[in-house]
Amino acid sequence: GYGKTVIIRGYGSREWQKVRDQWYAKLLSISSRIQSMESFLDSVEDAELRQILRLRYQDGLSQEEVGEIMGYSRQAIQKKEERFWKLD
C-alpha cells in the first residue's frame, strides 16, 4: 500500500523486531479505522449528505470549503450535518 521506506537507526535486531511489530500493529489499527469510516460513509443513503460527510471527515475540509464545492453556504452545510447527527 504505502510506498514509503522507514529507516530506524540505533536498534539491535530484537529491538528492531519489537519496533517493527508495534508499527505494523498500529498500521493495522489505522487501516481498520479507515475501513470502518468508509463503511459508515457508504451506508449513508442520501448521496449529497454522503458527499458532504466525505469532504468533511475524510478529506478534512471545513464547512465553508464544503459549501464552496457544493454550492451552499457554510450555514447550510452546518444545518445539514446537524440534522444528520441528530437523526443517527
Image (cartoon, helix red, strand yellow):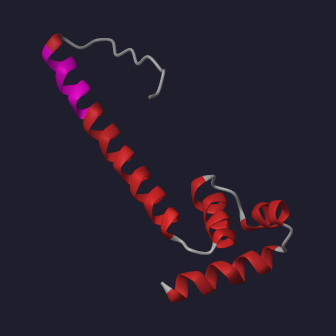
- Which residue shows up at 71% across the image and 62% down it? 62
Nearest the viewer among 1 and 30 is 1
- Which residue shows up at 82% across the image and 60% down it? 69
Magenta stretch?
Answer: 14-22
| Residue 74 vertical placement versus 87 (above, below) | above
Secondary structure that dominates the magenta span: helix
Residue 11 drawn at (x, y percent): 23, 14
| Residue 73 vertical placement versus 11 (above, below) | below
| Residue 74 vertical placement versus 10 (above, below) | below
Residue 20 drawn at (x, y percent): 25, 25
Nearest the viewer among 41 and 14 is 41
Q: Is residue 73 left or right of residue 15?
A: right
Kindly indicate the quadrant of the structure image that contains residue 45. bottom right
Residue 53 drawn at (x, y percent): 61, 66
Nearest the viewer among 41 and 83 is 41
Nearest the viewer among 14 and 4 is 4
Image quadrant where one finds the N terminus: top left
Kindly indicate the quadrant of the structure image that contains residue 12. top left
| Residue 58 vertical placement versus 44 (above, below) | above
- Which residue shows up at 41% across the image and 52% down it? 35
Kindly indicate the quadrant of the structure image that contains residue 80. bottom right
Q: Is residue 13 left or right of residue 74?
A: left
- Which residue shows up at 54% across the image and 71% down it? 44
Residue 64 part of the magenta-drawn span: no
